[in-house]
């Protein structure tokens, strides 16, 4: 008996003395909160953090550039509703990741950028440490929140605060600064364990005020030409069934913003996508669901919006209201709660919109779809954007559950209009900034988070921003098929140097470049295609095999237009004329 007692005592003492450290506490805190993946790039002082994370069962995806790891984390947040985590080294690695953090904040995606940093004592006296930088101060204006942890026993609190800040209210990017010394600090294991926090209800529901719901429903009921506009906030909110019920119960035509495509299938009879200009100009009451009246919606005014209208806006951020035009019926709360509250008030007696309005919308839609069909079915050689997109439209129709990543100018704008999406959160694109370079980061994260194939359609310029990650895609053997619409340049490949000098025009690339060889260099499958039939065969084979594939699709270099559909945003040069 005495022996057993001694043994127990010895165990208790050992346990008491067992040590943990900053590295392990960061990993334990992330895992405790259900975070399973880290997108990053190792080096001093976070190499062991990445190693230990992998050793402890997390999936660690090592990139070739931090911006791509950051974009992966940002879109992982959008896809999963959990903060996507990006891990970088100090100063330059941190700055490389910062663009993605700002992108996440701008797009309302939850993300946490964790960067190692050098010691406060040296940074604050500017004594020139290895990769010295006051990262916290630099991150703050680009993030929803920024925190630094100095003591190992505060790691639990630091991670908890970062998670809450990223996902609660309007989601966004959070910066978490972890000095090298912190990671190495040791602590009694029992004390460390007790210091961790499992965040309870990280994104609490925010119920709308009942009178705000009544106000919105009254406006909807009196509308003659109502329209519902769905934004990527609605896609993020995962209120898919209620949003569909609201659209169908009210019979109101709806318009999805780019990343809200697929929330209801684009082939839904009430979709007004093909009559976009008409409905924006003619609607009298517009209900915005998780969409901001920013540049993508012409700020809610001007010619695009035609006659006077009244807006209902559902958003979790109260200060979003009236940001561009007056909002007649603000409904502040989380989209799930707001839509369900409105649905509860709509009732079965809700009169469908006047037939006059519906007929006008659907007539225009049919006419425009017929025109689009003609464009798609034209046989042209070399391929133009539409010829290529006809093929990819059918691929997504046959594989509605794969993720579709899209960036470029013409390659983006035409694809958005042509390719129907059938499932929510499958269309992943350049977002609020119209930023190039998200392609490969998004493709990697979509494959990792969904465990399903990814089709990434990139302009040749767009692809160049993150192209080195084809090695990452091969290394992790991800089922990613990249299609490059290669028109030899930015917008077009036919510009010439106006001086007649030997330098190429500023918008052109090496003509006839073979991007497919990049994929082959790392053991993936490359294909160079010049016809729709070849494109179709290459993409279908990629989806069948699941092997990393890059299809270089040769597109007529003269087919694009300047800035795609954004020509009007270019300032006019008086010298141009
Ligand atoms: P889009 O570019 O598709 O028009 P935006 O990014 O402009 O969409 O708008 C998204 C909006 O959705 C933001 O204003 C954000 O505050 C809001 N939002 C995000 N998540 C939620 C949520 N769960 N509930 C309510 N609003 C949300
Ligand atoms: N840099 C960044 C980070 N984002 C940007 N949006 C741009 C530059 C400017 N830009 C665009 O807005 S689209 C684009 C650039 C450089 C590339 C368009 O060329 P592409 O597509 O080859 O990707 P198309 O099909 O040739 O139009
Ligand atoms: Mg191009």
Image: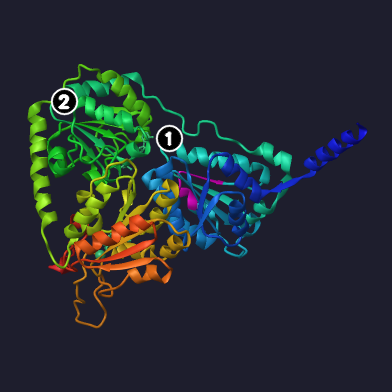
Q: Is residue 358 above or below residue 111?
A: above
Quarter-wise, where is residue 352 in the image? Answer: top left
Of the two numbered discs 2 and 1 on the same chain, state the one appearing first in sequence: 1
Q: Specify few, some or many for label 1: CA neighbours under 10 Å numbering under 14, 14-19, or 20 or more.
A: many
* Tags 2 and 1 touching, CB below 8 Å: no
Q: Position of residue 394 (x, y in %)?
A: 22, 51
Residue at image x 28%, y 59%? 408
Is 342 in front, or is 39? 39
Query: In the image as oriented, which residue stretches furthest toward the right?
Result: 2
Quarter-wise, where is residue 529 in the image? Answer: bottom left
The number of numbered badges drawn on the structure is 2
Colour mode of the rendering: rainbow
* Residue carrying label 1: 169
Is 148 in front, or is 460? 460
Whether residue 144 is in magenta: the answer is: yes
Q: Is residue 244 above or below residue 576?
A: above
Is 404 in front, or is 493? 404
Q: Quadrant of ligand 1?
A: top left
Using the numbered discs, state the Cα–Cα distance from disc 2 to disc 1 in whole angstroms. 30 Å
Question: Is the CB of the residue bearing disc 1 within 8 angstroms of ligand 1?
Answer: yes
Q: Which residues are magenta?
A: 139-147
On residue 124, which mark appears? none
Q: Position of residue 255 (x, y in %)?
A: 21, 38
On residue 223, which mark appears? 2
Residue at image x 40%, y 65%? 524
Q: Position of residue 82 (x, y in %)?
A: 47, 41
**Circle 1 SS class:** loop
């Amino acid at each position: 008996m005495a022996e057993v007692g001694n043994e127990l005592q010895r165990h208790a003492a050992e346990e008491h003395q067992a040590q943990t450290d900053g590295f392990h506490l960061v990993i334990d805190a992330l895992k405790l909160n259900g975070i399973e993946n880290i997108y990053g790039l190792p080096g001093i002082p976070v190499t062991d953090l990445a190693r230990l994370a992998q050793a402890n069962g997390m999936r660690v995806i090592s990139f070739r550039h931090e911006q791509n790891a950051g974009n992966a984390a940002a879109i992982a947040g959008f896809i999963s509703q959990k903060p996507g985590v990006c891990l970088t080294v100090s100063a330059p690695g941190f700055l490389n990741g910062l663009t993605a953090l700002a992108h996440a904040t701008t797009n309302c995606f939850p993300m946490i950028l964790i960067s190692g940093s050098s010691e406060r004592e040296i940074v604050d006296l500017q004594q020139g440490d290895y990769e010295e930088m006051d990262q916290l101060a630099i991150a703050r204006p680009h993030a929803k929140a920024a925190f630094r942890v100095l003591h190992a026993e505060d790691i639990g609190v630091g991670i908890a605060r970062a998670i809450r800040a990223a996902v609660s209210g309007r989601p966004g990017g959070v910066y978490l600064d972890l000095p090298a010394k912190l990671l190495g600090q040791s602590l009694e294991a029992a004390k460390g364990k007790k210091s961790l926090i499992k965040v309870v209800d990280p994104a609490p529901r925010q119920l709308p005020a009942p009178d705000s719901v009544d106000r919105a429903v009254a406006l909807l009921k009196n509308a003659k030409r109502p329209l519902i506009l769905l934004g990527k906030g609605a896609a993020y909110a995962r209120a898919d069934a209620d949003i569909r019920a609201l659209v169908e119960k009210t019979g109101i035509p709806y318009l999805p913003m780019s990343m809200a495509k697929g929330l209801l299938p684009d082939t839904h009879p009430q979709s007004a996508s093909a009559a976009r200009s008409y409905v924006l100009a003619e609607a009298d009451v517009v209900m915005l669901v998780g969409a901001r009246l920013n540049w993508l919606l012409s700020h809610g005014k001007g010619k695009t919006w035609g006659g006077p209208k009244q807006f209902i806006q559902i958003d979790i951020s109260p200060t979003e209201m009236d940001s561009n035009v007056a909002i007649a019926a603000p409904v502040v709360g989380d989209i799930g709660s707001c839509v369900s509250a409105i649905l509860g008030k709509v009732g079965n007696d809700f009169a469908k919109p006047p037939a006059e309005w519906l007929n006008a919308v659907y007539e225009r839609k049919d006419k425009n779809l017929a025109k689009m069909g003609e464009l798609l079915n034209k046989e042209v050689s070399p391929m133009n954007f539409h010829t290529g997109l006809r093929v990819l439209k059918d691929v997504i129709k046959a594989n509605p559950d794969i993720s579709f990543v899209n960036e470029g100018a013409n390659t983006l704008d035409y694809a958005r209009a042509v390719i129907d999406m059938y499932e929510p959160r499958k269309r992943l694109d350049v977002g609020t900034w119209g930023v190039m370079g998200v392609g490969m980061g998004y493709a990697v994260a979509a494959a990792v988070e969904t465990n399903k194939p990814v089709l990434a359609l990139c302009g040749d310029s767009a692809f160049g921003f993150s192209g080195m990650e084809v090695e990452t895609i091969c290394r992790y053997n991800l089922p990613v098929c990249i299609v490059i619409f290669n028109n030899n340049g930015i917008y077009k490949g036919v510009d010439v140097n106006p001086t007649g000098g030997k330098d190429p025009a500023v918008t052109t690339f090496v003509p006839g470049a073979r991007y497919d060889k990049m994929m082959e260099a790392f053991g993936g499958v490359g294909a160079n295609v010049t016809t729709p039939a070849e494109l179709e065969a290459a993409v279908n084979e990629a989806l069948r095999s699941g092997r990393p594939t890059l299809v270089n699709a040769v597109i007529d270099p003269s087919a694009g237009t300047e800035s795609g559909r954004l020509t009007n945003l270019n300032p006019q040069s008086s010298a141009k004329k």
